[in-house]
Image (cartoon, rainbow, N blue to C red):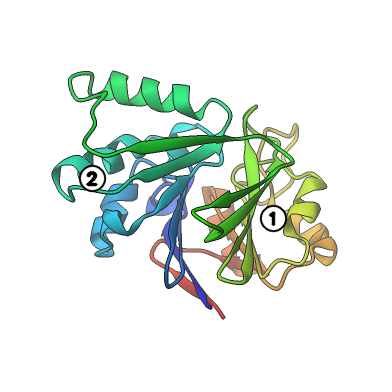
């Protein structure tokens, strides 16, 4: 079974280069998983003519706004524009239930809570393995070095293994995350090593460690303007909004 990765949003928190905030769609013949949901995600789904109702689950790497804020707009679209009848899984680090409740109630206090459809919220701890919807996907969790709750994921789906760092500074846990994967999707905010380190990877660090990363393909995203200005010097693919990758 093949896995299609749709790069809905590949940008950073300030939309460097006019890029939408981070959101990835992993699709097989019988399952669709949205990973992160930045502020522009619903608009990107609409532009790519993807029905939000096809999404079975939403998985968050952490709760910073450029990865989480669009959740309320996605949820509202499933109330008003694409009326949802089946459950929706919200998955993410510990604190997910409280963060969703805060986001929904602060944004639209007259609309939440509601029972238009059932929202199942499952919180993930680090160093664990979880199954989604009768083994349609298996998710392994790895602690990342960014926000306190940040998790990276090894997602086994459709017989393939997709590793996603979310936001993080470089650390050796990324090597473990990527081991034997078909694809590593790695954040790359900086071009040069930052001094001091401030919670994001650089191209120099990823390149220096690339021989240790056991994956078939490295794809970079969450690039700040420094990376985009040096993209002709970057050896790996820098994902663009709207890119589609088929993992066969």
**In this view, 240 is above or below 97:** below
> Seen in the image, is 233 located left or right of residue 55?
right
Q: Which of the numbered marks, if any, corresponds to residue 78?
A: 2
Residue found 60% across the figure and 42% down from its top: 167
Residue found 62% across the figure and 35% down from its top: 150
Judging from the image, what secondary structure is the residue with disc 1 in?
helix
x and y percent of residue 239 in the render? 51, 63
Residue found 74% across the figure and 41% down from its top: 127
Report whether residue 95 is seen.
Answer: yes
Place residue 243 in its image quadrant.
bottom left
Q: Residue furthest front?
A: 134
**In this view, 246 is above or below 78:** below
In the image shown, does 154 or 117 lie closer to the viewer? 117
Answer few, some or many: residues within 10 Å of disc 2's Cα (few below 14, many 20 plus, some between 14 and 19).
Answer: some
Report whether residue 229 is seen.
Answer: no
Q: Residue furthest left?
A: 80
Which residue lies under the disc numbered 1? 203
> Seen in the image, is 115 located left or right of residue 100?
left
x and y percent of residue 39 in the render? 35, 40
> Seen in the image, is 31 located left or right of residue 94?
left
Q: Which of the numbered marks, if any, corresponds to residue 119?
A: none
Closer to the observer: label 2 or label 1?
2
Judging from the image, what secondary structure is the residue with disc 2 in?
helix
Distance between the alpha carbons at the discs numbered 2 and 1: 38 Å
- In contact (CB < 8 Å): disc 2 and disc 1: no
């Amino acid at each position: 079974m093949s896995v299609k990765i749709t790069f809905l949003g590949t940008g950073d928190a300030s939309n460097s280069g006019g890029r939408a905030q981070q959101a990835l769609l992993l699709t097989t013949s019988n399952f669709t998983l949205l990973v992160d949901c930045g502020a522009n995600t619903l608009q990107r789904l609409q532009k790519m003519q993807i029905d939000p109702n096809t999404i079975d689950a939403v998985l968050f790497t952490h709760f910073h706004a450029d990865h989480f804020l669009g959740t309320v707009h996605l949820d509202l679209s499933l109330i008003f524009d694409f009326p949802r009848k089946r459950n929706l899984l919200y998955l993410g680090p510990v604190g997910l239930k409280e963060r969703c409740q805060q986001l929904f109630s602060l944004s639209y206090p007259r609309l939440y809570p509601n029972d238009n459809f059932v929202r199942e919220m499952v919180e993930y701890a680090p160093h664990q393995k979880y199954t989604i919807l009768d083994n349609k996907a298996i998710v392994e969790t790895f602690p990342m070095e960014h926000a306190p709750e940040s998790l990276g994921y090894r997602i086994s789906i459709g017989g393939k293994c997709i590793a996603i760092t979310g936001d993080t500074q470089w650390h050796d846990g990324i090597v473990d995350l990527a081991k034997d994967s078909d694809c590593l999707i790695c954040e790359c905010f900086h071009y040069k090593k930052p001094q001091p380190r401030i919670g994001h990877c650089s191209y120099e660090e990823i390149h220096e460690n690339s021989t240790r990363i056991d994956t078939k393909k490295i794809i970079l995203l969450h690039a700040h303007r420094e990376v985009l200005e040096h993209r002709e010097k970057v050896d790996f693919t820098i994902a663009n909004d709207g890119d589609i990758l088929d993992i066969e």
